Image (cartoon, rainbow, N blue to C red):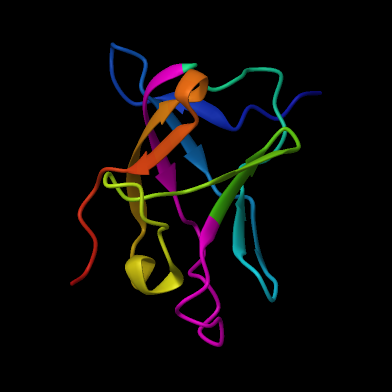
C-alpha cells in the first residue's frame, strides 16, 4: 500500500508535504520529503511542513537541502543565496517556489530576522 505524503491545500492544488526525516551532516542539513509516485509540479508553489525541528546542535551556517524521490536540491532565498539552518529557527511551515527547468527552489515565506 502506498503512503500518500502529498495532499493539496487549496482548489488550485498547491502541494502540502511533511518532512519525513531530517539528516544533519558536515556539509548540509537535508530535509527528506519521502518517496512518492506523484512528482512535485515542475513549476509552481508548494507548502512544506516541518513536523520536527532541525536539531539544536546543527551548525547554523549549514545550507538546507531538500530530497524527494532520491533527488536532492539546494534551497535558496529569492535572491539565490543559500537558506541556512539559522533561517529556519522555529519555522514550522515554509512556502516554496519550484521551477525544475531553471533549477530554482526558493523559500518564499518570511523567516526570522
In the rendered image, residue 101 lying in the magenta stretch gets the answer no
Going by the image, does 97 lie left or right of 33?
A: left
Instruction: Count all numbered tags in the image, as a single digit.
Output: 0
Who's the residue at 43% across and 66% down the image? Answer: 84
- The magenta segment: 43-64
Who's the residue at 27% across and 44% down the image? Answer: 78
Percent across and percent down for residue 28 are 61, 66
Who's the residue at 46% across and 49% down the image? Answer: 75
Q: Quadrant of the N terminus?
A: top right
| Of residues 36 and 25, the one drawn nearer to the viewer in this rendering | 25
Percent across and percent down for residue 41 are 48, 17
Farthest residue in the bottom direction?
A: 57
Quadrant hosting residue 88 = bottom left
| Of residues 44 and 15, the one drawn nearer to the viewer in this rendering | 44
| Of residues 2 and 113, the one drawn nearer to the viewer in this rendering | 113
Going by the image, does 100 lie left or right of 106?
A: right
Q: 46 above or below 92?
A: above
Going by the image, does 19 lie left or right of 82?
A: right
Percent across and percent down for residue 77 are 32, 50
Going by the image, does 97 lie left or right of 37?
A: left
Amino acid at each position: 500500500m502506498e503512503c500518500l505524503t502529498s495532499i493539496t491545500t487549496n482548489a488550485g492544488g498547491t502541494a502540502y508535504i511533511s518532512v519525513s526525516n531530517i539528516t544533519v551532516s558536515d556539509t548540509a542539513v537535508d530535509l527528506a520529503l519521502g518517496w512518492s509516485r506523484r512528482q512535485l509540479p515542475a513549476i509552481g508553489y508548494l507548502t512544506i511542513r516541518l513536523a520536527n525541528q532541525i536539531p539544536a546542535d546543527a551548525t547554523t551556517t549549514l545550507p538546507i537541502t531538500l530530497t524527494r524521490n532520491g533527488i536532492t536540491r539546494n534551497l535558496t532565498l529569492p535572491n539565490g543565496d543559500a537558506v541556512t539552518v539559522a533561517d529556519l529557527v522555529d519555522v514550522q511551515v515554509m512556502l516554496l517556489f519550484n521551477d525544475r527547468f531553471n533549477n530554482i527552489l526558493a523559500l518564499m515565506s518570511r523567516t526570522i530576522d
